[in-house]
Image (spheres, rainbow, N blue to C red):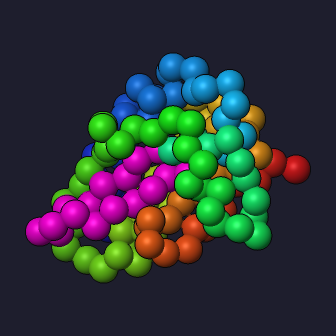
Amino acid sequence: MYINKLTEFDYWLDSVLRKKLPSGTVAVNFNLYDNVDDEWSVELVATDEFDEEDEDWACCEVFTTRGNPFGIKHDGTWEDVQKIFEYNVSNYLKNGKFAHKLRNYQAVGIGFVDRNITILYKKD
C-alpha cells in the first residue's frame, strides 16, 4: 500500500521546501519513526555533512521538521513503511514542485533512526 494521502505528503513537503533551508545544508535525510498503534511518521532533516561511508552524517542537523512530522496509519511492518516512504520521496524527487531544491544537495537519504540509511539521490 502506498500513501493514499499522496497529495497530502506532497503538500507537507512543499510547505517545508517552500522556505529556504539553512545555507550550510549539504544533504537531506528523511527520518522514519515507528510510533504506536500502527502509526508512523517521517521528518525531514537538513544536515551540514554528508559521508556515504558514515551514516552519522544524518545526525549533523542544521534543520528539522521534528515539531511538524508527516504521519500515516498503516498496519504493516517497518520494511513496508520504509518502502511506502521511499516510493513517495522518490516520486517527489522526480515530479515534486520543489524537487530541484532537493537535487541541489549532495544527497537525499531515508531510513528509520535506528536502522540503515538508503540513499535515494546522490549528486554526481
Query: Which is more toward the observer, 30 or 22?
Result: 22
* Res 10 visible: no
Check the image and report above or below for 112 versus 97.
below
**Dominant SS in magenta:** strand
Image coordinates for residue 44, horizontal then vertical, percent: 47, 44
Tell me which residue sits at (49%, 52%) in the image.
30
Q: Nearer the viewer, residue 64 or 98?
A: 64
Q: Residue 123 appears at what percent x and percent y? A: 81, 48
Report the quarter where the N terminus lies.
Answer: bottom left
Quick check: 16 left or right of 90?
A: left
Residue 90 % position (x, y): 57, 53
Q: Residue furthest left?
A: 37
Q: Residue furthest top?
A: 19
Which residue in the rendered view is the most extreme toward the right?
A: 124
Q: Kindly indicate the quadrant of the structure image that contains residue 117.
A: bottom right
Q: Is residue 39 magenta?
A: yes
Between 74 and 58, the residue placed more toward the observer is 58
4 vs 103, left or right, is left
With respect to residue 94, does 14 lie above or below?
above
Task: Name the quadrant containing residue 68.
Answer: top left
Q: Is residue 15 visible?
A: yes
The magenta segment:
29-44
At a point 37% along the width and 52% down the height, the residue shown is: 42
Q: Is residue 16 magenta?
A: no
Residue 109, given in percent of the width and then of the height, sits at 60, 57
For the point 76% across and 70% down, the residue is 53
The residue depicted at 36 percent of the width and 68 percent of the height is 81
